[in-house]
Image: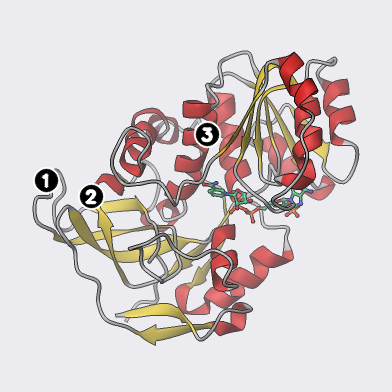
Amino acid sequence: MYAITLREFGGPEVMMWSEVPDPVAGPGEVLLDVVASGVNRADLMQRQGHYPPPPGASEILGLECAGRVAALGEGVTGWSVGDEVCALLAGGGYAEKVAVPAAQLLPVPAGVDLVTAGGLPEVACTVWSNVVAAGRLAAGETFLVQGGSSGIGTHAIQVAKALGARVAATASPQRADRCRDLGADIVVDYHQDVPAQLAEATDGHGADVILDNMGAKALAANVTMLAADGRLLVIGMQGGTTAEVNLNTLLRKRGTITAMSLRGRPVDGPHGKGAVVAGVREQVWPMLADGRVRPVVHATVPMDRADEAHRQLEAGGVVGKLLLEVPIG
Ligand SMILES: NC(=O)c1ccc[n+]([C@@H]2O[C@H](COP(=O)([O-])OP(=O)(O)OC[C@H]3O[C@@H](n4cnc5c(N)ncnc54)[C@H](OP(=O)(O)O)[C@@H]3O)[C@@H](O)[C@H]2O)c1
């Protein structure tokens, strides 16, 4: 098969569309013929050598894909050869074929085409495991997502809205309207004073749940913005890894800070990828099927030109997901 390989760690130019051995479906796994894969910020970090795959995972980039079941490994039930599916991956999505644990498969949601489905599993699993499972966002609460126009942000706005929350998002001013169109009630410019803008828009309440992509750079502001009993969910470190937190502020609010990665989770167990995928299928897939949540695709690029997609994501200004489509023939 062909796949994107890395000549060395570095810029987008190190990616090559090369012939590599086909993967094989082991026990409990399914082999997929990939149709499309989603591009994630983590892929840029892996390409640069800053985000190695977890032990045992494919070295090939790609944390999600959609395609057709080509073969079933020993012991797999519930799926058939030819089924159209999408999958959460620990790696290997930038390729014509990938082997994935059956527990990480999802059906293509009703009303979503196969290529578009390739960009859903990573955002849906990240948002559900944080905002729903850990954050317990409830109807009537205020939710803030940092980076509202991102792949994660565009999905999180819609899921939070479908859960009945009041939704706030940070974004660049030129992308504020896109966040409003997706359901954000409040959009604040992340270049300005975010806590002051949110306090004004919420009459001083702040946010009950915050989904944060910035890490260290936004930690103090995020703690300031938490409402009483608020939950801060850190998923990204675009603004660094190390910062101080004022425990007195956090304590007085009875606040919690959680930082979680999806990729490193085991497949099985109560906090494994299989449990996350099952939760997404039960609670988020119906939102896609009835149109409360719609996939947001910025552009689709041929997979052998993955370098172009990485350049676009690095440049900023992408709204929603970038997809890589496997070239035909
Ligand atoms: N923990 C996990 O399991 C997990 C899983 C998936 C993703 N993530 C993380 O989630 C984040 C979003 O992922 P993605 O793939 O959707 O990324 P993405 O599409 O590349 O989006 C990055 C976003 O950050 C925004 N941004 C830039 N500077 C900002 C600032 N100062 N404050 C707030 N937002 C700012 C950008 O806005 P502009 O375009 O306007 O610059 C852009 O919308 C990333 O940090 C990623 O690493 C974590």
Q: Earlier in the sequence, mark 2 or mark 3?
A: 2
Residue 193: tell me if it is visible.
yes
Q: Farthest residue in the left direction?
A: 75
Under circle 2, the secondary element is: helix
Under circle 3, the secondary element is: helix
Nearer to the camera, 201 or 234: 234
Q: Nearer the viewer, mark 1 or mark 3?
A: 3
The image shows residue 185 at horizontal and vertical percentages of 72, 26
Q: Amino acid at mark 1?
A: Thr
List the residue tagged with mark 2. 102
Mark 1: give few (<14), some (14-19) or many (20+) Cα within 10 Å.
few
Determine whether label 2 and label 1 are within 8 Å by CB: no
Under circle 1, the secondary element is: loop
Nearer to the camera, 280 or 322: 280
Q: Is mark 3 within 8 Å of ligand 1?
A: yes
List the residue tagged with mark 1. 77
Above or below residue 231? Residue 267 is below
Could you say which disc has been placed on residue 211 in the image? none
Determine whether label 1 and label 3 are within 8 Å by CB: no
